[in-house]
Image (cartoon, grey):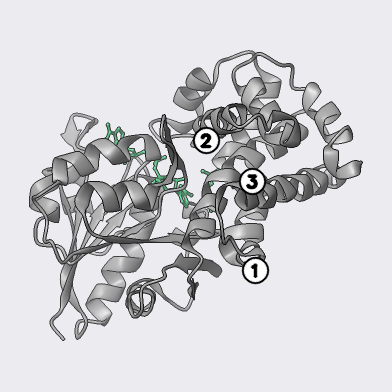
Amino acid sequence: MSKKSVCIVGSGNWGSAIAKILGKNAKDRSDQFETCVKMWMYEEMVDGRKLTEIVNTEHENVKYLPGVKIPENVVAIPDLIKASEDADILIFVLPHQFVAKTCEQMKGKIKPSAIAVSLIKGVSIDDSGMRMISNVIKEVLGIECCALMGANLAGEVAQEQFCETTIGCAVNGTGELLKSLFETPYFRCSVVTDQATVELCGALKNIVGIGAGIADGLGHGDNTKAAVIRLGLMEMIKFSEIFIPGSQRATFFESCGISDLVATCHGGRNRMLGEHIVKSDKTVKQLEKELLKGQSFQGPLAAREIFKMLKDKNLIERFPLFVSVHYICLRESQPEEFINCLRNHPEHI
Ligand code: NAD
Ligand code: 13P
């Protein structure tokens, strides 16, 4: 079997943490993978220097993952086509709002035999309905695309603290190939075939994470957070039953499901957003700029997209937690209303 070359499309907080894993594995498993891992970087200036130049000389993404060394065989490239044209495996790890545009630029310029894997937590909604991000990648580029998501807060993964992740892949052999690319003693990968549920969990848990932060901001404790997690999980399951035919309950017990929900509701950026929404009167955009310094909250966009799906199908009353988070992010509802929404949740009737 010929060696596979790997390109990471994206280089933010999670992209940089995953670059650390992929750089080491490509080097250690050189019978399977080309040692050089290319990483496309959306170029920007940091303290008067190009970020790609900083990464390639200091081997650290000083803006998005400071303090963590990225292996020297990971090369940051600002030109998307140069980075991706020779790749056999494309790892997509961008905030979901940039995926379609990025893929359009790559269309017709990558290897037709390449495979992709999406690490992106979000969905794409347009007039024709909801598509998983892997489907956007698949449709635009005409290649196979799997998904990898789990309870994987980037900072902790970068510190090599043990965690699990889920690879969603229905194609024979590809899941095992991706497992051998990503797995380390501290990053344990399980492969399941129910890919759509894996991806949907990744998008929906970000909305619940904001809810957990709202409860924190209001001064509530662990019992309330546990209720947010349980009711959020029930809405995630119900949503998948309605919108993904064939979705399997067992997938919610993988890392992409309950574990990611718990991790996000305790340590995620979306949880932090919820807390700050309560404690300030700033907009989500202002809070993103101030708190994340270039990184992005994916929950508010997911809440808006999911709200549109629910409204179009007349299902708003059945998903009060998702809907309440959406209105609070827009500042059209008071944070205190979130607790009322939990109190009156249809799961209690
Ligand atoms: P991030 O929040 O750090 O986002 C910043 C990135 O977006 C930077 O690389 C920036 O260069 C890039 N960017 C800005 N404008 C752009 C544009 N116009 N086109 C393309 N790129 C642009 O990103 P992240 O944390 O790496 O998250 C990427 C995905 O991974 C998201 O879907 C997120 O939910 C998911 N994820 C994140 C974590 C985490 O802990 N950070 C963990 C698991 C999954
Ligand atoms: P946040 O985007 O809320 O930080 O969540 C990161 C994540 O997806 C952890 O698995």
Q: Quadrant of ligand 1?
A: top left
Q: Amino acid at mark 1?
A: Ala
Residue placed at 60% from the left, 65% from the top?
251
- Looking at the image, residue 259 sits to the left or right of residue 178; the answer is right
Q: CA distance from mark 1 to mark 3?
A: 15 Å
- Residue at image mark 2: 302
Q: Could you tell me which secondary element the residue under label 2 belongs to? A: helix
- Looking at the image, residue 57 sits to the left or right of residue 286; the answer is left
Comes first in the chain, label 2 or label 3? 3
- Residue at image mark 3: 239
Q: Comparing marks 2 and 1, which lies closer to the viewer?
A: 1
- Residue at image mark 1: 250
Query: Badges 1 and 3: C-beta atoms under 8 Å apart?
Result: no
Q: Percent position (x, y) of residue 57?
A: 16, 52
Residue 2 to residue 326: above or below: below
Q: Percent position (x, y) of residue 290?
A: 48, 24
- Determine if the C-beta at disc 3 is less than 8 A from ligand 1: no
Seen as rendered, the residue at the extreme right is 349
Residue 67 shows up from this direction? no
